[in-house]
Amino acid sequence: MLVKVTIETVPLYSLKYQSMHYPFTEGSQLWSTMIREHRHVEWYYFPGEEQIQVKIMDQIPIVKQPRTSKKIEDLKTNIVENGLLFIASELCKRQPKMTKWVSLLASKTVPTGIKEGLCYEIFPSARNVKFLEMEYAIPLENFQECMQEIHFTLKSHPFKVHFPIECRTMMGESGILSPTQGKESAYLAFHMYKGMDEKDYFRWVQSLMKKYGGRPHWGKLNDLTKDRLLELYPEYPLFLKIREKYDPENVFVTDYFKSFI
């Protein structure tokens, strides 16, 4: 039973957000520099396309986003990133061959620009288009080779997928079941629009991530088995002992987790 919780916070801060287009090759060359020079860096790789979107965020002195600017950004998000994406996704669901053209169009028309505001105004994004998702953490040193293989494979458009692959980085964590396992890592998130057939694409993703040492995000789709979990997390037996000590009656054991005990 939890009787006391202490939450550590930081003072309110603002962020400067930049969204840019880069050719895939140039973006790859700048990747290592970007992630060291900026607080947050995200890649959006459009399947099989030569142009990526790069999002950068850096902490700045306190400044609020102007009301007019916020309304324009909200409108842009609702219309372009949600409304048009929903329409395009519905078309792809009915005509899967269109995924190639939608991916190309998205890579060229995704919004770019700069905005500043309080962290809670800038950091979150509305996501109203439903999808299935897998996300894996791989050692940071494997990222560029992995992305090169992804790009080489998807240029032939072997899968009917138009959602971009989202890439971000994270410092290593010490938790027994942390996907980063104490190593600087890159997270790659793969999506498929709800209602479209994801099986072949996600099967390929799972195979690819095993090759590059990927550990799946616990809260998203994965193919973990107990044997595979023990391979990825050598200290898992220690976790089970600690879990049993604090929850001997299995109050917090879910149906999903039962297969791993």
Image (tube, grey):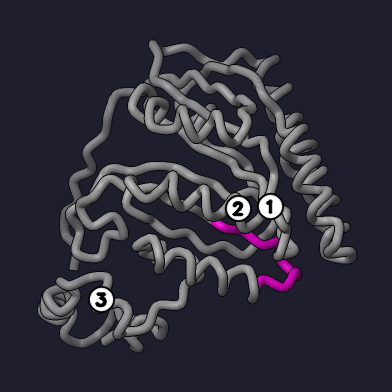
Residue for badge 3: 231
Q: Nearer the viewer, mark 2 or mark 3?
A: 2
| Mark identifier at residue 152 | 2
Residue span colored magenta = 190-198
Q: Quadrant of the C terminus?
A: bottom left
Please give left or right for residue 230 compared with residue 137 in the image. left
| Callout 1 crowding tier (Cα within 10 Å): few <14, some 14–19, many ≥20 | few
Residue at 58% from the left image edge and 18% from the top image edge? 115
Answer with left or right where residue 186 lies relative to residue 18: left
Task: Using the numbered discs, state the Cα–Cα distance from disc 3 to disc 1 in whole angstroms.
Answer: 32 Å
- Crowdedness near tag 2: few (<14), some (14–19) or many (≥20) residues, C-alpha within 10 Å: few
Q: Is residue 129 above or below residue 66?
A: below
Which residue is more in the foreground, 151 or 122? 151
Q: Are marks 1 and 2 in contact (CB under 8 Å)?
A: yes
Q: Quadrant of the N terminus?
A: bottom left
Q: Reading the chain from its start, which is encountered first: label 3 or label 1? A: 1
In the structure shown, which secondary structural element does the residue marked by tag 2 occupy?
helix
Tell whether position 192 is magenta. yes
